[in-house]
Amino acid sequence: MDAGHIGVWHPMIGKSPAGEGRRAAVEIESLGYGSVWVNDGWGSKDPFACAAVLLAATRRLAVGTGIASIWSRDATAMAAGEVTLSDAFPGRFLMGIGVSHGPLVGLRGHDYGKPLSAMDRYLEGMDEARKDLPAPQAQAPRLLAALRPRMLELSRDRAGGAHTYFVPPEHTVQARDILGPDRLLVPEQAVVVETDPARAREIARAHMSYYLTLPNYLNNLRHLGYSDEDFADGGSDRLADAIVAWGSPETVAKRVGAHLDAGADHVAIQPLSPAGPDLPDALAQLRVLAPALGL
């Protein structure tokens, strides 16, 4: 796979009408970004179907699921989706899977239980199912959504690497140390091209507000040295500046570079907008960021 070092993560690429998603993917490819990522959450379309639509609309762009929840489909169905897209688009599909979050899993009617054990069993089920599936032309990299050390260790031992989310470059350093040199590491990095500190942090806090209700992210941030004071009132300035790269295109590019210097193989940037997820605004930011990112 040759997806370069920088891609795009944005919820509206998968949530928008198919025509809008296709046009966005084509433009993202033309700007020089190497990947787009589609998520699997409430209000999202099926990530495998969306990935197929976007892959068919583009020529070189890699498409990743970021992430496909193990609670949305059983291991056999997940393995079948993995093989189907790996075979149809060799070298262009990235398989990101994860255990999601307790509150979201509960809404699906499942017991979150022990996520690490659940993921381990699920991977065993996928591997067993693949024995009866036709071998694809090229096996897609299988990345686990991982934050804490034990899930990162599982990403190293049972998968091709990790797709991390809502993390600063300090986490990328730790993740690379655990994964070792030969596993893929793809962090997401929220960005906003905005030079006014108050406005940029307002956008950052609006983005962070939901994630700061989810224990997995809070526990990971505590592990990195943040405290309850940083989580109050939508997040401290310190936390907002760590999670969201803001400023001029050149300043944003430096943060992306910090992840790469810390050991990331590929960084998926998520452009934030003042009124929430907005695909046209995201594309406008991607246009001005591309030269600063060296694309």
Image (spheres, rainbow, N blue to C red):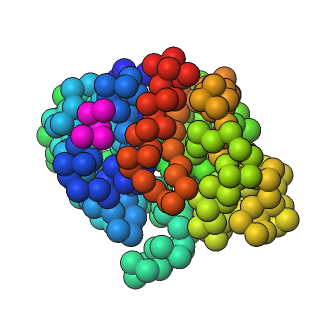
Q: 47 and 153: which one is in front?
A: 47
Identify the main secondary structure in magenta: helix
Residue pictured at 38% horizontal, 69% vertical? 42
Q: Is residue 155 visible?
A: no
Image side of residue 19 versus residue 218, left or right: left
Image side of residue 212 versus residue 279, left or right: right
Where in the figure is residue 278, as x and y percent of width and height? 42, 53
Look at the image and tell me in which quarter the C terminus lies: top left
Q: Is residue 91 above or below residue 70?
A: above
Where in the figure is residue 167, as x and y percent of width and height? 65, 46
Q: Is residue 112 above or below residue 70?
A: below
Residue pictured at 68% horizontal, 39% vertical? 195
Q: Which residues are magenta?
A: 23-27
Residue pictured at 59% horizontal, 39% vertical? 193
Residue pictured at 55% horizontal, 60% vertical? 116
Where in the figure is residue 137, as x and y percent of width and height? 19, 28
Report if residue 25 lies within the magenta region. yes
Where in the figure is residue 112, as x and y percent of width and height? 51, 74
Image side of residue 150 versus residue 139, left or right: right
Task: Name the image quarter holding residue 242.
Answer: top right
Look at the image and tell me in which quarter the N terminus lies: top left
